[in-house]
Amino acid sequence: MMKKILLMAVVAMMATMNVNAQSDEPKNEVGIFYGIGSASDIISTYAEVFSYAVGGQSSFWGPIGAEYYYHISPVVGVGAIAEYTSCKVDALNQNEACDLTYITVMPAVKFNWLRKKSFGMYSGLAAGVMFASIDPGSSVKGQLDSDGKEIKKETATSFMFNATALGVEFGGNFRGFGELGIGEKGILCFGLRYKF
């Protein structure tokens, strides 16, 4: 029984290698994107609500990012995603500004479950680390908080993820794409991708 299982596994691997060898599909792809409704956007919304409550304003940018995948088969691609997000919160004047910055790096996997010459559909998963930075305004930096600690720039790291439930891409080797998911790339994500 064990010999049969081993023989079937070897035959399956050889068939997969043969399909990959005959495939003319590009193995590498790079992309850039912009997301809406990311996890860091939700975190920054609390800062924006506070800013409006005290009569200030805020601006949010991101996530903007880049991705790379290497296709180990026509169906599965492995790679990484890197993103940058920032939020600037102004209270009553410019000296009371607070800058929130998020940088995220995540290993990722992509599953191409529909592959046509000029159209494709896929899903994906990514998990990694987010580096967050909070830089208080110059008017409060160096002062003491209610616990007697000096107010200064703070940094933190946190687990971050992204799950793409449905991705759609269209075009040739140069493609546009849109994604619906949850996590740091956002609920909606749009971008451009190049396969080579």
Image (tube, grey):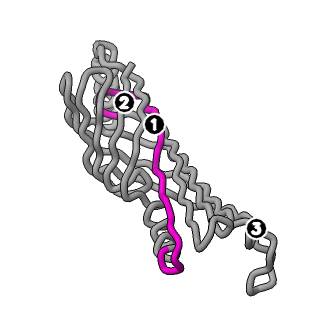
- The residue identified by callout 3 is 152
User: What is the three-letter code of the residue carrying label 2?
Assistant: Arg
- The residue identified by callout 2 is 193
State the residue at coordinates (34%, 37%).
2
Q: Position of residue 77 (x, y in %)?
A: 38, 33
Q: Is residue 70 magenta?
A: yes
Binning the other alpha carbons within 10 Å of mark 1 as few (below 14), some (14 to 19) or many (20 upward) gives: some
Q: Is residue 121 magenta?
A: no
Binning the other alpha carbons within 10 Å of mark 3 as few (below 14), some (14 to 19) or many (20 upward) gives: some
Q: Which residues are magenta?
A: 52-76
What label does residue 67 carry, if any?
A: 1
Q: Nearer the viewer, mark 3 or mark 2?
A: 3
56 and 106: which is toward the camera: 56
Binning the other alpha carbons within 10 Å of mark 2 as few (below 14), some (14 to 19) or many (20 upward) gives: many
The kind of secondary structure element at disc 3 is: loop
Which residue is at the far bottom? 146
User: What is the three-letter code of the residue carrying label 3?
Assistant: Lys
In this view, 123 is above or below 12: below
User: What is the three-letter code of the residue carrying label 1?
Assistant: Glu
Mark 3 and mark 2 lie on one chain; the one further toward the N terminus is: 3
- Could you say which quadrant of the image residue 169 lies in? top left
Q: Are marks 2 and 1 in contact (CB under 8 Å)?
A: yes
Q: Position of residue 59 (x, y in %)?
A: 49, 59
